[in-house]
Image: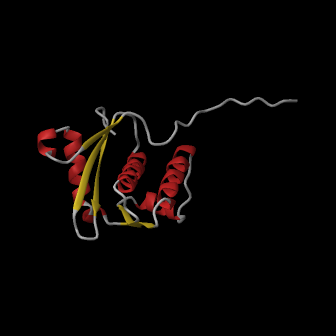
Amino acid sequence: MNSNGADVGIVLITSEGHHLMSAIHFKFYVTNNDAEYEALINGLKIALKVGVVNLIARSDSELVVNQVNGGFQARGPRTKLYMRCVQRLLEKFGNARLEGVPREENSNADALEKMGLQMDILQLGQIPLGIREIPSIPEVGVFQTQEIP
């Protein structure tokens, strides 16, 4: 995360090989892992919106892929909310799975992220740049509890 916000790139590829790309700028604080989850969540929402039924989602975040697929335990309430959100979205597809992809094979999404970071609309051209003001998950609050005697 930098002082200007964080950015992610999303690339949807149809079975025919067509690319639908999007860049998203977050105006709220996100950790690197939060940004990975936000990218996945927003990509899944785009896929649902355009009517995708069968989906293979790919992420270069080994942590996120393994948490969502049950290989790693999600620690912390915020991470658990992100993980559950992704799992619920995946259930909305007829057939969906999440796979890991090496970072070097994720160059299209990384390039979109860098363009979004520069907020360069001319460079983005026809690629939509979304602005997110709030996280995809509810804020995690801290509550004080008091024991009742």
Quadrant holding the N terminus: top left
Name which quarter of the figure residue 52 lies in.
bottom left
Name the residue nearer the viewer: 80 or 63: 80
Q: Residue at x 38, y 63 (%)?
A: 57
The residue located at (29%, 41%) in the rendering is: 130
Residue closest to the eye, 122 or 6: 122
- Using residue 29 as the reference point, say whether residue 79 is left or right of it: right
Residue reaching furthest front? Answer: 51
Question: At which x and y percent is residue 96?
Answer: 44, 66
Residue drawn at (65%, 31%), measured in percent from left and top? 143
Instruction: Looking at this view, name the residue that lies furthest to the right.
Output: 149
Image color mode: secondary structure
Residue 3 at x, y percent in the picture: 30, 32
What is the total number of numbered labels drawn onto the structure image? 0
Q: Describe residue 96's horizontal placement relative to residue 75 as left or right.
A: left
| Image height of 12 relative to 75, above or below | below
**Residue 90 in the image, given as x and y percentages of width and height:** 47, 60
Q: Is residue 129 left or right of residue 147?
A: left
Q: Position of residue 85 (x, y in %)?
A: 51, 51
Q: In which quarter of the image is residue 61?
A: bottom left
Determine the residue positioned at 56% across, 58% down: 73
The quarter in which the C terminus is drawn is top right
- 22 lies above or below 145: below
Q: Nearer the viewer, residue 36 or 75?
A: 36
In the image, 31 versus 135, the foreground residue is 135
